[in-house]
Amino acid sequence: METMQAAVLVAPKRFEVRAVAVPALGPDDVLIRVDRCGICGTDIHMFNGHYAADMLPLIPGHEFTGTVHRVGERVANLQPGQRVVADINIGCGHCFFCRRHEVLNCAEVRQVGIHRDGGFAEYVAVPGRLVIPAPDDVAPQMLALTEPVACVVRAARKADVRFGQSVVVLGAGPIGNLHIQMMRLIGAAPIIAVELTPERATLAELAGADRVVSDPATTEATVRAMTGGRGADIVIESVGNAALYARAFELIRPGGHVAAFGITGPQDSVPLKLLDTVLRENSVKGSVAGMGEDMHDALTLLAHKRFDTEPFTGSTYPLDSIQEAFETLKDRPGVLKTQIEM
């Protein structure tokens, strides 16, 4: 049996790095030798036992890049040695939602690194149709950001952001910072970030926020002052906090909408003033992950240096130190992304 080293999350808060079987390769699959795999907020939720605990033991990791190692007999468009990234969302391919490119709503959807073994390992197997060739001149640490950038690409699409619109981003952690940069690319103005952590507030300003609010008590006054008293066209919640979602609805203008991105607990909810929603013609638009063309567009943006990736690429741990990497994340608020290097 061919084996590899992998970080298996055997229980909440406990990784075991051990030898496991190299993933079996079906005729339509590609075996990728992993170079880098980023730690996502979803991985942290899994590590803490707040998400997908019923899937353990599991090899997490879905922000990966690497090189093609082997291909299945029916894969004709990829060759060993090619550098690649991968769309992690595996739908049935034929249902109503898959046909409409809404794969995450497919009843049979499985995500690499969440519902099946992922990239915190030497090798990961992915259906060949989801593997995307990557340019040779883009560094692995940047390619490993393709999936999170795809998430903000899709969020911007779903929110239908247009140039000149005012946007508030609640939370300027890793994904919030990327939302800010995405809004800057589109031409949103003004962009107001709300972030309490000093290190991340500074990074939000560098990312392109026109104003960073660090005192929650001044948020509404700042938003009103910068939007002619109306409120924001769009508020993006990127934390996953019910109280912040409630706040988001208070910050939008009549006719504005909340872009729901942050993942809350399954029982979390917010009160919604239905009459206000109807009379003001407000709305909420959800988005959770990039898929399909979002991944291709994210890769193009990264290849052409449309994102400042420096704050995301300075923290790297070897695979055998993955437990330490997860345990120390909360102590390094100025680090936007930690990657595991194989």
Image (cartoon, rainbow, N blue to C red):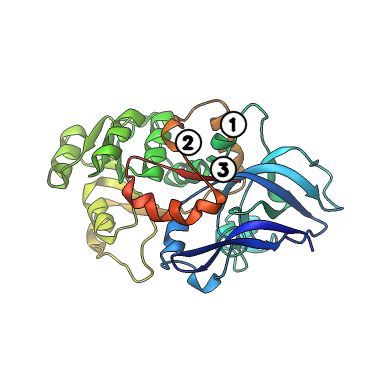
Of callouts 2 and 3, which one flags the residue occurring earlier in the amino acid sequence? Answer: 3
Give the mark, 1 or 3, whose residue is nearer the N terminus: 1
Task: Say what amino acid the circle numbered 2 marks.
Answer: Thr
Q: Give me the disc on residue 101.
A: none
Specify the quadrant of the image occupied by residue 5: bottom right
Say left or right for 340 vs 337: right
Q: Amino acid at mark 3?
A: Asp
The x, y position of residue 35, in whole percent, is 63, 42
Real-space Cα separation, disc 1 to disc 3, in angstroms: 20 Å
Q: Could you tell me the amino acid type at mark 1?
A: Ala
Quadrant where the N terminus sits is bottom right
Q: Which mark is residue 139?
A: 1
Instruction: Please indicate, yes or no, whether residue 257 appears anywhere in the rendered image.
Output: no
Residue closer to the observer: 280 or 342: 342
Percent x, y of residue 103? 59, 57
Q: Which residue is mark 3?
A: 294
Residue positioned 74% across, 44% down in the render: 68
Q: Residue at x 24, y 35 (%)?
A: 212
Question: Do residues under tags 1 and 2 come within 8 Å of each other at their CB atoms?
Answer: yes
The residue mark sitting in front, 1 or 3, is: 1
Which residue is at a point 25% across and 43% down the rendered structure image?
Answer: 195
**Distance Cα–Cα, label 1 vs label 2:** 10 Å
Determine which of the numbered discs, if any, sits on residue 313 in the image. Answer: 2
Mark 3 is surrounded, within 10 Å at the Cα level, by few (under 14), some (14 to 19) or many (20 or more) other residues, namely many
Viewer-nearest residue: 302 or 119 = 119
